[in-house]
Amino acid sequence: MESIKIAVLGAGTVAGGTFRVLTRNQEEIARRAGRAIEITLVGARDPAKARAVFGPGVAIQSDLFAVVEHPDIEIVLELIGGETLARELVLRAIAAGKHVVTANKALLAHHGNEIFAAAQAKGVMVAFEAAVGGGIPIIKALREGLTANRLSWLAGIINGTSNFVLSAMRSEGKSFAMALAEAKRLGYAEADPSFDIDGIDAAHKLSILAAIAFGIPVQFHACYTEGIGALELRDMQAAEQLGYRIKLLGIARRAERGIELRVHPTLIPSRRLMASVEGVTNAILIQGDAVGATLYCGAGAGAEPTASAVVADLVDVTRLHTADPENRVPHLAFRLDALVSTPILSIDDVETSYYLRLRVLDRPGVLADVTRILADASISIGAFLQHEPEENQDQTDIILLTHRALEWRVRAAIAAIEELDSVLGSAVLIRLEELA
Amino acid sequence: MESIKIAVLGAGTVAGGTFRVLTRNQEEIARRAGRAIEITLVGARDPAKARAVFGPGVAIQSDLFAVVEHPDIEIVLELIGGETLARELVLRAIAAGKHVVTANKALLAHHGNEIFAAAQAKGVMVAFEAAVGGGIPIIKALREGLTANRLSWLAGIINGTSNFVLSAMRSEGKSFAMALAEAKRLGYAEADPSFDIDGIDAAHKLSILAAIAFGIPVQFHACYTEGIGALELRDMQAAEQLGYRIKLLGIARRAERGIELRVHPTLIPSRRLMASVEGVTNAILIQGDAVGATLYCGAGAGAEPTASAVVADLVDVTRLHTADPENRVPHLAFRLDALVSTPILSIDDVETSYYLRLRVLDRPGVLADVTRILADASISIGAFLQHEPEENQDQTDIILLTHRALEWRVRAAIAAIEELDSVLGSAVLIRLEELA
């Protein structure tokens, strides 16, 4: 059978990795897909760079719009990143009847609904396994593997940079700044790491996962996002003493009055497998009503892990491109006409547990005052830790773990606590999830 | 669109779980699959029992052969278990042009090649996600998610009963017999647990996974199988001291001269995530050349976790049953005409590391004699542990961890070591894998 012809937009790391994997494993991939998959055309603004990446066998064009409409091409692989140009190119490719494979989570977080609707109308596929969790086939697991389940929640370590920084803080006792510097040195963090460290990248990915899990539109704009930049080593150590570890999690949960969609540092029990996921590894835990909890771990980034997901999509599209669109898996797991508009909850209306650290004067009655305020707000306490005051200090830290409570209640109680004369400065508040 | 009509063979636990999940989540499943999936016919030798499981809405027949050929039925779900009758029924269903979904690993381990060939010839699908790893979508991950990769090995905790027993031994210091008794009491082990404990169930599953991973026929008969019945608590404890845990693993590896296919107790480093997979949970670790290592964990058995996988298959088949067979994923990941006959290696030709415990007389020169024999066989030692002899004892245990060596070499060296006057009884030999 004739090979299927791919055009690639971009000549960066993932493009290079994809070309390498397709070339190295071409025989094995053809044995699985039933026909060869061949990159024949590359669109790149820097043709010399593209030539260095793809070698002499491909045609290279700098007019990207001509590439996505080229008549020989059946699948357009979008790897240029960014949102604006990528959106235009992808929509143009769809309009030209091409299937699209993309690794671009920012694109889908911002414009996914528009893109999927256009693809549906045109009867083409947009595949995006590489957009979340690198090489872990998490989109496929969620969209096809767990299709029997009503999913109640998912929680993911979906940003490798942040997880590397937190792992280095915990295991080596480094400060946030030192750990981040190490991540930069090792190439795990960009020169400007804010996208990763502030949780935005994780929020992009989470909004895609939540759409697939719950059959809702992609709603990145509604995702609560808090990064790891304010985390202190002593809170990681106190968490450890209490039997917890701090991870940057993306959490999506079906609650009574809506869907929780939030990215923030989170205490999780140290005994959970997820707590032992270290370094740049990603892990996603999914809770379904039939299957219970399933966990998926692997490399969340890197040229070849991402290429692994890209090529899996290329094989899927190759298999199904001649099939009736009715035979295909819906882009967001649920058919577009079956999406529902369950509201995303404000963070105020999220219910979770909390780690609370207060700097207090070391004198009688402080704890009584604090716990009285919490009790009056119906917030109950699950664990308590107080360190000995350092020598010649009249101050100390008290740490409380609460049971589940609504965030606005906890915020209000903390405001009252911070008003106490014996409480110094601001409270440190970190959410806590048992993940069970 | 009209619903798709399923016939179920069997009325046991998984059949009941599947009916429950399909009923409870019917709306959500239809939103994903595009049409309703309905069990309309049940074949069961005990109609009263089937009625109790499926309620009044289904037709029940005791003639199973009439069920698989019923003209209204599009998919036959085989859940009766066993090999002989199940094989006949499945082949008859295929001959009648029905698609088949099965959870029967013994059936596929013994008759998979025959069944897949028949299905291919007839243009129907045989789906079997539930046969391995319960609700973990591991067949899909391996067959579709990792399709870009040349896979070098996989290692799985794929028998929950054994893992429960080993976990109870390690964490509670129980003997094998006590731990097994507890597993029986909790319903995790059958009255006759030999299928699980002896590694046969794991070997069934491993032979299926290996076929998909490497593009080879299913070769259960060639799988080396060793159970956990001979494991002693003191070896688990010694392993722990050396930084390892003992798990019953199914391992498939592409070696230079063939494929390793083996189930046996295995020391793995305690720091690996897989070492922390406890109780009846299953976990499969897969190494691909592009993606690196990915890990999949979840419930490996139980009515609803298994039903989760069964229903995922029903949805897949529902989507693709009207598609050209060319559009479908090959049963064994690779197209039948692309399977290769790489030989399965004898256990003698497997290369791995070893844990070796010897009971020796506590006198000078013993260690020198032992290590000399190993050195002469070119087997090098990675770690060494000797306990103080118990009081008033002239005997003690010495424990060695070797580097990688061919099994036949190690066996020969051990035979020579057992000949030494200072070595008492037989050596304990447990294989060791770094899983990296």
Image (cartoon, coloured by chain):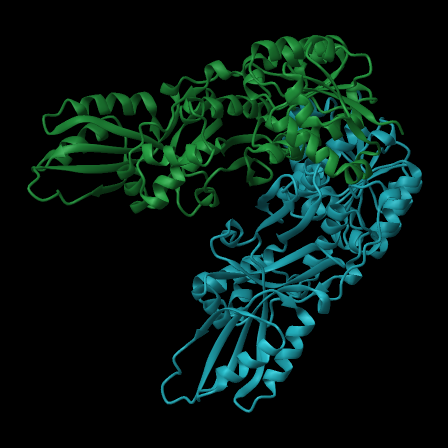
Chain colours: A green, B cyan
Please state if A11 lies on the left or on the right of B77 as rendered.
left
Give the position of the N terminus of chain B as an image quadrant: top right
Q: Quadrant of residue A323?
A: top right
* Residue at horizontal 14 percent and vertical 33 percent from the top: A360
For residue A212, say whether it is visible. Answer: yes
* Residue at horizontal 61 percent and vertical 88 percent from the top: B419
Where residue B341 appears, as percent x and y from the top left, is 84, 53
Q: Nearer the viewer, residue A60 or A394?
A: A60
Q: Compared to B422, does B123 lie above or below?
A: above
Where residue B111 appears, as percent x and y from the top left, is 84, 53
Q: How many marks?
A: 0
Q: Compared to B40, does B107 lie above or below?
A: below
Residue at the outermost front position: A48
Where residue B390 appears, as percent x and y from the top left, is 39, 83
Q: Quadrant of residue A316?
A: top right
Q: Compared to B64, does A2 lie above or below?
A: above
Where residue B116 appears, as percent x and y from the top left, is 85, 45
Q: Nearer the viewer, residue A18 or B427?
A: A18
Residue at the outermost bottom position: B421
Q: Quadrant of residue A104?
A: top right
For residue B64, say whether it is visible. Answer: no
